[in-house]
Amino acid sequence: MAEHIFKEYGLDRMTIYEMNQETIIKSPVKLQNYHLIMLTEGSIEIDVNYRIFQMTGLSSLHLSAGDIIRKIKASDKVRGYHIVFSDEFHAEIRSTRNSPINLQLKKEYPYQIFTEKEYDFLLQSVSRLITYINDTTHFYHALVIKNEVHNLVLNISDKRRKEHGDKIYKADRQKMILERFKGLLNGHCEKQHEVSWYAEALTISADYLSKITKENDGRSARAWINEAIIAKAASLMHYADLNIKEISEKLNFTDQSSFGRFIRKNTGMSPKEFRGYVTDTDNIPVIS
């Protein structure tokens, strides 16, 4: 597994992995850093915050800290780059293009497909980055790396803005509410289990929130919340040092019994059976 690490002030600032089956992100997982996946060959199916992206060759996908990868499946032969940024380095790079439009575009359209010419241009940036990272004798080592990262990210953002810039102003209100609801679930479902809390945060009624979710995929807001809690539970059950009682407390259940009833109702399994299922298969049951 080839990796190239940019260090500054004694800290890892960015790592570039030459992607193969071994470097594919394991799931389910909540990301702690900002990621950029550039897929040159092969295919990857990835479920990010309840959105499924079908990556093909000559494409990129931005992933942010806090994103939950529920499932990921790659073809036998994948080739490309997986770049991971530290929080501090990402914030530093982002500061030069931190406009509301750019941020909203990246959130709505994290997946981007390129022409061969466009993608080859991006690969040249990655190739230069690897060269700069490995040449620690360069007097301006850190500066040329930061400049090249800016170039790479800005070129991807330029393509995104040209393709989707007008859409951000014409976005359907219900779609925007649904995306905000997904974001709230991602950040708060461990503690907040009631539809009314999310509706209040979105400044709409609970009935209207359920109307929007049902019109989009046939499920109520309650079903969405339950699925988010199940996903969180599945993620926590991968930690062997956490027992069922501790997991139930982290997920804000009044006691272990109520947590057990919730798991059985929504998965058809006891917490012990569910733990065995997710740790053996890396799967999260989908609530119908």
Image: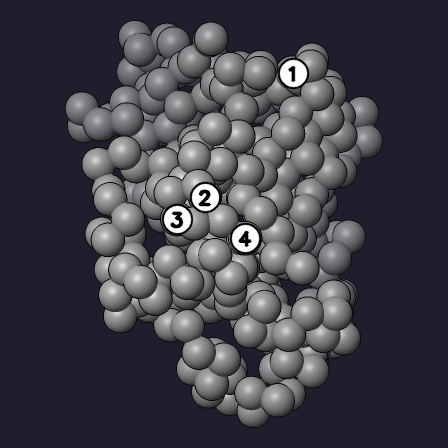
Horizontal side of 11 relative to 195 (left or right) equals: left
Is residue 273 shown above or below 182?
above
| Residue 114 in which image quadrant | top right
Q: Earlier in the sequence, mark 2 or mark 4?
A: 4
Circles 1 and 2: CB atoms closer than 8 Å? no
Q: Name the kind of residue labelled 1 in the image.
A: Arg
Mark 3 highlights which residue? 271
Circles 3 and 4: CB atoms closer than 8 Å? no
Which element is circle 3 on? helix
Mark 2 highlights which residue? 274
Q: Name the kind of residue labelled 4 in the image.
A: Gly
Q: Residues within 10 Å of mark 2 (few under 14, many from 20)?
A: many
x 70%, y 20%: residue? 75
Q: Nearer the viewer, mark 4 or mark 1?
A: 4
Which element is circle 2 on? helix
Q: Nearer the viewer, residue 155 or 224?
A: 224
| Residue 260 in which image quadrant | bottom left
Q: Is residue 90 visible?
A: no
Q: Nearer the viewer, mark 1 or mark 2?
A: 2
Is residue 49 shown above or below 166?
above
Q: Residues within 10 Å of mark 4 (few under 14, many from 20)?
A: few
Which element is circle 1 on? strand
x 30%, y 8%: residue? 137
Mark 4 highlights which residue? 268
Q: CA distance from mark 2 to mark 4?
A: 9 Å
Q: CA distance from mark 1 to mark 2?
A: 34 Å
Q: Earlier in the sequence, mark 4 or mark 1?
A: 1
Q: Name the kind of residue labelled 3 in the image.
A: Pro
Q: Is residue 15 visible?
A: yes
Horizontal side of 282 relative to 214 (left or right) equals: left
Mark 1 highlights which residue? 79
Circles 3 and 2: CB atoms closer than 8 Å? yes
